[in-house]
Image (cartoon, rainbow, N blue to C red):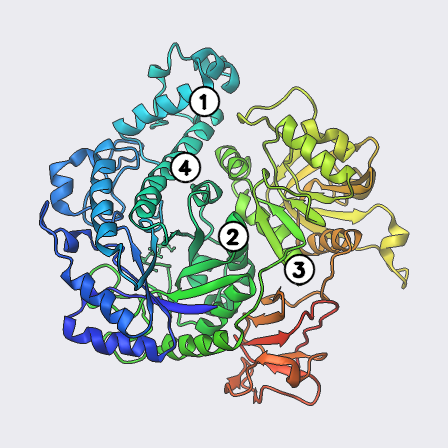
C-alpha cells in the first residue's frame, strides 16, 4: 500500500519545484499524478508544443525516487480548439451550449473531438514512452463530472440513432419493446428518434432508459480510444481512470472493462452534504460517513476484482460543498486507512498545494499557499509510514455480494414514484446493515458470477430478465442465501411492466407475489412487527417490537413462502405480510417488501449472515467500521468519541493511536492503551494483526 499526491507544476514558478518535490519524498509519498488539465499549456497554439516543463517535472519526480502517473489532458480542450471546432461543445437538453471557461465542455460523440483526442493523446504518450519514471496513465479526468455524461447535441442525436439501430435492428422492434402505442409515441424510422429534449410532461420511461444506456456507452467508447492509444505507445503502462463518488450516470463496470486498475476520487465531508440522503451529523461533517465512502470503495474494487486506488483523497477543507468545515484532527490519515481496509493499494491526495489562481483557490492542499505544511501533510506522512509497516496485507476476500445495477438505478430514476425514493440511499440501507456487522462486501453487477459468495443482497433489482431470474434461482437451489429488497422484479429490461404479478420471473423463487404497493409520505405511519410474536418477544416475554420502515410498502401474498413480518399500522395494510422467507433447494430467500429502517435492516442482514455461516462482529456503533484483508483487521473511527476494543491487547496492534494526542468530544484525553483493551482516538485507527472479526466488540470507554 502506497501514498501519493496530485501536483500541478504548471501552476508554480519552476524555482519552487525542487522544494515541493523534495517535501513530497520526505513525507514518504511514492506517486505523483500530473497533467490532467494541461492541454492548453502543452499546446498553446495548434501544432506548437511545449513539453519541456513536463519533461523537467517528470525527471524531478524520478530523481526523488517517486513514480509519475500522467493523464491524458482531454478534460479541458483549450480555447483555440473550441473556437476552431465549436461543434465539440456539449449541449444541454434545451440546446444551451456548454461554453469554454470551466472544464468538461466537450461532447463524447463529437467526431471532431475524437480526432483531436487522438492527436493529443498520441503526442503525449509517445513523448513519455521511454521514460523510466512514468508508471501508468489516467484517462481524462472524472468522466461525467458536472453532469456531463448526457449531452444533447446533433452529434449525439446521430450517434443515438445508430445505437438504437444496433440494439433493436428495426424500428418496429423498438416500438414494441418500449410500448410506443402510449400517447402516440410510435416511430416510423430510427431517423425520427431524438434525444429526450424539453417536453410538457415527463418522458417515456423506456426512452429515458435507452438514452441513459446510450450516453454511458458513449463514454465507454471514448475511454477505450484513450486506453488503446496509451497501450499502443507502451504496453507496460497501466491504464486507469478516476471515477467519482456516488455517481449515478456512468456505468463504471462497463468503463472498467477497458482498464487495468480502477481508481476513484474520495471527498468524505463533501459527499455527506451534496449527495447524501438526510442531514449530516456533526461527526459526519468532520469525517464523512464510512458506509457512503465504503460502498464506493467496494464498488470500484469489485469492478475488476483487484486492489483499487484512491486517485484523489480529500486533503483538508474543499471548495465545492455548501459548507466546508475543517475535517476532524487526523481525518486525512483515517480516510487513507479506511480505503486500505477496503482493499486500496494506493491513496493519492488532491492536491499538493493550495492554488493561488483560478476556480479552486478555496481548496486545501497538503501544503498551504505559501508552500509550508498544512493540516493534511502530517496525516499523509503518517499514513505513508504506517502503510510501509503493513506491507503484504492481502486482497479483500468478501463473503457477501451486494448487487448494484445501473439499469435499475436509471429506471427507478425515471419513475421514482416518491420524491424521496433514491436508489443509492436504498442500496446504502442494506449495505450499511451488512457493514455494521464487520463483514466485507463486494458490490457487483447482476451479471457477476455469484457462485463463490455465501450470501447475496439485492436491494432493488428492479429490471429482471428471465435469464437473470434463472441464474438467481440456480444460485439459491445450490445452497445460496439471498435477501431481496422492495421493487424487485417489477419490470422487464426495457423498463416495461409485465402482465404477471411481481416479482415477475422471481415469483417462484420468492414464493410470494406483490398484491399492492404504496409509496408513503413521512406523516403516514410506517412500521412492521414480527409475525411470530413469541419468537420475536425474546426471553423476557415482553411485547414484540414494532420496527420502522420508510417510503415504500408492498402487501405480499405468500404462496410457498412463510411470512416473517406484517404491517403494524393504522391503515389498510395492517396485518398483511411485509417480509417473507422461502426455502428453495439447499438455500433460501428473504423478500423484504419495504425500505427497512436500521433495526429491521440489521435483523434481516444478521439472519442472512447466520444462515450463510458468515463470521460477523457484534453490532458496531454508528460511524465505526471494521474491515479485514488477509493478515490484518482495521478498526476505523469516524466519530469524535474515544473507543475501546476490550478483547484486543496492545501487542497485537500493527498500527495504533498510542502516540496521538487523542482528545475526544467530551474533552477527555488519554493514552492509546488502557488496562482493559486498547483505545482508538477520535477519528482514529487501529490495525490488528490477523483476522479478528469473529465476535469483535467495540465499546465506548
Ligand atoms: C463535485 C465537484 C467537483 C468534483 C466532485 C468530486 O461535483 O463540483 O469538482 O470534484 O464533486 O468528485
Ligand atoms: C475533483 C476533480 C479535481 C478537483 C477536485 C476538487 O475530484 O477531479 O480536479 O476539482 O474534485 O475537490
Alpha carbon separation for disc pair 1 and 2: 35 Å
Q: Residue 307: tell me if it is visible.
A: yes
Crowd around label 2: few <14 · some 14–19 · many ≥20 (10 Å): some
Q: Position of residue 486 (x, y in %)?
A: 65, 39
Which is in the foreground here, disc 2 or disc 3? Answer: 3
SS at badge 2 = loop
Q: Residue at x 45, y 62 (%)?
A: 268
Q: Upstream in the sequence, badge 4 or badge 3? A: 4
Question: Where does the image place residue 257, in percent across and percent down from the top left?
Answer: 46, 43
Tell me whether the residue at label 4 lies in contact with that at label 3, contact meaning CB atoms closer than 8 angstroms. Answer: no
Mark 1 vs 3, N-terminal side: 1
Q: Which of the 4 quarters of the picture holds residue 517?
A: top right
Residue 277 got which mark?
2
User: Sequence-wise, which precedes: disc 2 or disc 3?
Assistant: 2
Cα–Cα gap, marks 2 and 3: 23 Å
The residue at the point 30 percent across, 44 percent down is: 229
Secondary element at tag 4: helix
Ligand 1 has an atom within 8 Å of the beta carbon of the residue at disc 4: no
Decide which of tag 1 and tag 4 comes sooner along the chain.
1
Q: Are marks 1 and 3 in contact (CB under 8 Å)?
A: no
**Residue 435, numbered circle:** none
Query: The C terminus lies in which quarter of the figure?
Result: bottom right
What residue does disc 4 label? Answer: 216
Amino acid at each position: 500500500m502506497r501514498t501519493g499526491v496530485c501536483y500541478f507544476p504548471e501552476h508554480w514558478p519552476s524555482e519552487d519545484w525542487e522544494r515541493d518535490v523534495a517535501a513530497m519524498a520526505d513525507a514518504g509519498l511514492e506517486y505523483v499524478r500530473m497533467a490532467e488539465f494541461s492541454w492548453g499549456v502543452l499546446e498553446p497554439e495548434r501544432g506548437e508544443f511545449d513539453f519541456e516543463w513536463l519533461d523537467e517535472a517528470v525527471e524531478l519526480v524520478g530523481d526523488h525516487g517517486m513514480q509519475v502517473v500522467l493523464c491524458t489532458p482531454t478534460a479541458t480542450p483549450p480555447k483555440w480548439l473550441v473556437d476552431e471546432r465549436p461543434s465539440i461543445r456539449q449541449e444541454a437538453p434545451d440546446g444551451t451550449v456548454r461554453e469554454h471557461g470551466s472544464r468538461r465542455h466537450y461532447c463524447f460523440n463529437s467526431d471532431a473531438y475524437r480526432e483531436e483526442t487522438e492527436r493529443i493523446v498520441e503526442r503525449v504518450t509517445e513523448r513519455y514512452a521511454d521514460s523510466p519514471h512514468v508508471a501508468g496513465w489516467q484517462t481524462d479526468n472524472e468522466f461525467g463530472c458536472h453532469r456531463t455524461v448526457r449531452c444533447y447535441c446533433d452529434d449525439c442525436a446521430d450517434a443515438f440513432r445508430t445505437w438504437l439501430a444496433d440494439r433493436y435492428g428495426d424500428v418496429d422492434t423498438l416500438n414494441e419493446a418500449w410500448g410506443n402505442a402510449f400517447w402516440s409515441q410510435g416511430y416510423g424510422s430510427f431517423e425520427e428518434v431524438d434525444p429526450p429534449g424539453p417536453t410538457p410532461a415527463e418522458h417515456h420511461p423506456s426512452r429515458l432508459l435507452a438514452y441513459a444506456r446510450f450516453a454511458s456507452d458513449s463514454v465507454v467508447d471514448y475511454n477505450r480510444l484513450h486506453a488503446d492509444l496509451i497501450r499502443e505507445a507502451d504496453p507496460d503502462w497501466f491504464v486507469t481512470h478516476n471515477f467519482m463518488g456516488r455517481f449515478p450516470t456512468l456505468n463504471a463496470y462497463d468503463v472498467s472493462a477497458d482498464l487495468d486498475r480502477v481508481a476513484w476520487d474520495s471527498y468524505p465531508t463533501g459527499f455527506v452534504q451534496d449527495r447524501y440522503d438526510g442531514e449530516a451529523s456533526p461527526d459526519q461533517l468532520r469525517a464523512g460517513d464510512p458506509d457512503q465512502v465504503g460502498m464506493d470503495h467496494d464498488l470500484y474494487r469489485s469492478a475488476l476484482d483487484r486492489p483499487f486506488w484512491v486517485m484523489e483523497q480529500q486533503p483538508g477543507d474543499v471548495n465545492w460543498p455548501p459548507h466546508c468545515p475543517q475535517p476532524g484532527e487526523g481525518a486525512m490519515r483515517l480516510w487513507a486507512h479506511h480505503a486500505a481496509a477496503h482493499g486500496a493499494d494506493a491513496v493519492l491526495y488532491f492536491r499538493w498545494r493550495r492554488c493561488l489562481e483560478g476556480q479552486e483557490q478555496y481548496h486545501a492542499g497538503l501544503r498551504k499557499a505559501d508552500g509550508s505544511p498544512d493540516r493534511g501533510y502530517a496525516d499523509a506522512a503518517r499514513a505513508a509510514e504506517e502503510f510501509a509497516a503493513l506491507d503484504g496485507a492481502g486482497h479483500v476476500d468478501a463473503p457477501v455480494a451486494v448487487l448494484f445495477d445501473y439499469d435499475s438505478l436509471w429506471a427507478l430514476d425515471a419513475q421514482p414514484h416518491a420524491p424521496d425514493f433514491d436508489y443509492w440511499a436504498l442500496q446504502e440501507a442494506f449495505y450499511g446493515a451488512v457493514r455494521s456487522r464487520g463483514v466485507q462486501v463486494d458490490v457487483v453487477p447482476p451479471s457477476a458470477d455469484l457462485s463463490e459468495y455465501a450470501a447475496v443482497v439485492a436491494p432493488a433489482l428492479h429490471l429482471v430478465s428471465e435469464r437473470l431470474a434463472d441464474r438467481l434461482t440456480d444460485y439459491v437451489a445450490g445452497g445460496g442465501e439471498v435477501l431481496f429488497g422492495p421493487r424487485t422484479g417489477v419490470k422487464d429490461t426495457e423498463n416495461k411492466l409485465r402482465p404477471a404479478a411481481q416479482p415477475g420471473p422471481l415469483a417462484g423463487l420468492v414464493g410470494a407475489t406483490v398484491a399492492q404497493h404504496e409509496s408513503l409520505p413521512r406523516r403516514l405511519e410506517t412500521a412492521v412487527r414480527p409475525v411470530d410474536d413469541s419468537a420475536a418477544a425474546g426471553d423476557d416475554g415482553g411485547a414484540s417490537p414494532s420496527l420502522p420502515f420508510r417510503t415504500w410498502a408492498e402487501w405480499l401474498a405468500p404462496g410457498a413462502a412463510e411470512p416473517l413480518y406484517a404491517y403494524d399500522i393504522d391503515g389498510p395494510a395492517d396485518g398483511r405480510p411485509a417480509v417473507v422467507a422461502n426455502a428453495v433447494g439447499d438455500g433460501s430467500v428473504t423478500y423484504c417488501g419495504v425500505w427497512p429502517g436500521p433495526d429491521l435492516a440489521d435483523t434481516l442482514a444478521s439472519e442472512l449472515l447466520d444462515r450463510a455461516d458468515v463470521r460477523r462482529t457484534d453490532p458496531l456503533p454508528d460511524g465505526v467500521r471494521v474491515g479485514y484483508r488477509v493478515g490484518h483487521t482495521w478498526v476505523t473511527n469516524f466519530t469524535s468519541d474515544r473507543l475501546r476494543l476490550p478483547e484486543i491487547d496492545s501487542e497485537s496492534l500493527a498500527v495504533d493511536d498510542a502516540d496521538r494526542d487523542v482528545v475526544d468530544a467530551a474533552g477527555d484525553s488519554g493514552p492509546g492503551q488502557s488496562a482493559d483493551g486498547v483505545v482508538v482516538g477520535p477519528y482514529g485507527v487501529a490495525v490488528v494483526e490477523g483476522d479478528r472479526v469473529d465476535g469483535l466488540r467495540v465499546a465506548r470507554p
